[in-house]
Amino acid sequence: MINEMVALIGRVAIYSLMFIASLYFVNQADKSKSRGKFIFLSLLALIIPCLFAAFRGEKVGTDVLQYAKPYYLGALNSSSLQAFLLQGSAETGYEVFVFGITKIFKDFTAVLFFTEALIICPIYIVAIKNRKNFPMWVTVLVYYMIFYIASFNFMRQSIAAALLLLAYFELVERKWLKFIILIFLAQLFHNTAFVGIVIILFGVWFYRIRSKQLRILVFVILCTFLVVASQGWQNILMWAINDVNILPRRFITYINIFMREQDQNSYYFLLTKSNYIELIFRWILYLIPLFCCKYSKRKLNLYHSANIILLMSVVIYTVLFVLFHTSYAVRATWYMEYFFIVWLPMSYSKFQENNVKIGVVYRNTACMFMAIFGYWFFGYMILGWHGTLPFYFSF
């Protein structure tokens, strides 16, 4: 018991020191008036979490030994990119990335370092884009509390999710070329990115519908489609694999697993109290801002479509969790969940307004940060979501 408590205090202290150091430089960069100083401080802020991710132990994050290390070793021993691509079954973008980093640095820590860089840099650009609406450190803090440790496991999918979040802002700003490039890159890093692309486009389009009647009609059609799809999801996925080649053939394995869902001994259907806690926290993180923001009069129209996307994420996750009794639902909604990085800072800025009583501001701020911290502390520090416990360094 004492040893467990010491270990808990140790990992909380290690992560906290890293987060505080990085957020300090983020905040200083945000306040900086000099472009050169801004770039320098931003680099310091980003290097810290990348180094932390790079020097973690190989068993911190399930997918490190599942595919990251094997692909590194494969690239190290391959004579050419073509030969390496013929060996692997992952997405082309990830394979080219691993091959390039491996051949340049010949060090696995470099692969982990630049993997985290590919995730956190798009998040940081999102923070920069929104610095007039809310402080950059709040955006980065939300990423650290909810997604940073998960990126130790969902590496390929986290890269794709971060790219899609940035793509959303390019879409809202009508920067079509950047949007197309980003969604193309996201698809190159994970085949399921097209799910996030479709929902992002739907969310933005749905928000721009001005007719209440048309919105209701679209909602009814969507619900009908989801009911029908739930009955024939196997056929839809097989169509995506065989006819349009959106998904790789390895997804047939997942289809077979979920068709045999009565096999409750399968890893995919072993629900624990940890899974239920994660579901509850998702709803808390979504609903608390709704409660807090009802006191605000100012509207940030830019984010309404983001709210729609995030609501769809929470609802879809809950439906899949209940229908299939699987925690693997998180894979289907991971792209939309990254919109918490927008939703929570947006709500923070709204209840910081001058027309809100100071007591309400303190209460709302405390509620939001307690929810975020609770998600991180109970989920990652105690329950070890994503196979990230015990934490240790590779040196």
Image (cartoon, rainbow, N blue to C red):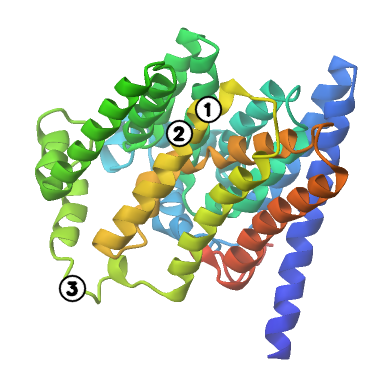
Q: Which amino acid type corresponds to the residue marked 3 in the rendered image? A: Asp
Q: Measure how far apart labels 3 and 1 are at the Cα level.
A: 41 Å
Q: Residue farthest to the front? A: 213
Q: Nearer the viewer, mark 3 or mark 1?
A: 1
Q: Nearer the viewer, residue 183 or 152?
A: 183
Instruction: Answer with the quarter of the image where residue 211 lies.
Output: top left
> Whole-percent x and y of residue 93?
40, 30
Q: Are marks 1 and 2 in contact (CB under 8 Å)?
A: yes
Look at label 1 and name its amino acid. Answer: His
Q: Nearer the viewer, residue 307 or 262?
A: 307
Q: Is residue 118 visible?
A: yes
Q: On residue 161, which mark appears?
A: none
Q: Which residue lies at the image location 41% right of the left edge and 74% below the top edge?
A: 272
Label 3 sits on residue = 263
- The residues bearing labels 1 and 2 have C-alpha atoms spaced at a distance of 6 Å
Residue ID at (24%, 34%)? 220
Residue holding disc 2: 308
**In the figure, residue 114 lies in which quadrant?**
top right
